Every structure is written in structure tokens, then in C-alpha cells.
Amino acid sequence: MKNLHFIGFLLLGLAFLLYYMLPEFSFVKLFEPISLMGILAGIGIGLIIGGIVGYVSKGSALKEEQKRKELQQLRREKEDLEKQAAELARQQAKQNIPPNENPQNY
């Protein structure tokens, strides 16, 4: 969003510079209705474009945050499964039962 503000001010300055370079430039003409309509139209178009860009970027940020949360949840589940597997292996080691043999065959 900061970049959009910077670009907006840059374009506003460029528009003023171009208007200043006109041969019939005067500050009085800057406040005539036709000039004010152009300025307001430019601001309106900028707000519309800025709103669309903001909406899209917020949607992308929300999707990215959701993916990050899902990834963290999957990592936690993986760690829990690894802990359970280690606990099961430790219990089998205490009982002196080889992990590949079936105790029901004895």
C-alpha cells in the first residue's frame, strides 16, 4: 500500500509539472471548473484502482496466512505421530519383543 501512495504522489507531481509547462499556465486556471473536474476524476480513478488492488492483495495475504496455519498444523501432527511411534518402540523394547515378530505365534 505504501508503494501505491508513492506512485500516486509521483503521478500527481508529474501531472502538476506537465500543467506547469503549458504556455498558458496560471494558478488561477488551475482552479477553474474544467481543471478541478480533471483533478477530481484522476483522484476518483486512483481510488477505484487502489481499492481493487487493496482487495486483491488482502485476499492473497489471507490465503497465504491460511496456508501457513495449515502447514504448522501438519507439522504439529507429524511431531505428535513421531512421538507416538517413539513411545511405541520404547514400550516394545521394554517387553523385549522384536518389532518384526508377532507375539501371538508363541
Image (spheres, rainbow, N blue to C red):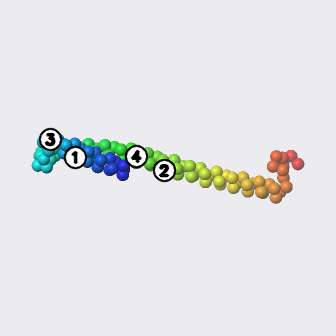
How far is the residue under mark 2 from the one under mark 3?
53 Å
Closer to the camera: disc 2 or disc 3?
3
* Residue occupying image coordinates x 61% and y 51%: 75
C-alpha distance separating marks 1 and 2: 41 Å
For label 1, the residue is 16
Crowdedness near tag 2: few (<14), some (14–19) or many (≥20) residues, C-alpha within 10 Å: few
Q: Secondary structure at mark 3?
A: loop
Q: Nearer the viewer, mark 1 or mark 2?
A: 1
CA separation, marks 1 and 4? 30 Å
N-terminal label among 1 and 2: 1
The residue singled out by tag 4 in the image is 57
Between marks 1 and 4 in the image, the one whose residue lies nearer the viewer: 1
Q: Residue at x 22, y 42 (%)?
A: 18
> Which circle's residue, 3 or 1, is located before the other in the chain?
1
Q: Position of residue 40 (x, y in %)?
A: 20, 46
> Which residue corresponds to the image point at 51% horizontal and 47% vertical from the top-left?
67
Q: Position of residue 32 (x, y in %)?
A: 11, 46
| Callout 1 secondary element | helix
Mark in the foreground, 3 or 4: 3
Quadrant in which residue 96 is drawn: bottom right
The residue carrying pointer 1 sits among few (fewer than 14), some (14 to 19) or many (20 or more) residues within 10 Å by Cα, namely few
Question: Contact (CB < 8 A) between labels 1 and 2?
Answer: no
Disc marking residue 23: 3
Residue at the extreme right: 106
Say left or right for 71 vs 8: right
Specify whether residue 59 is in view.
Answer: yes
Marks 1 and 4, the one that precedes in the sequence = 1
Amino acid under disc 2: Glu
Q: Earlier in the sequence, mark 3 or mark 4?
A: 3
Measured as percent of width and height from the top left, residue 28 is found at 11, 49
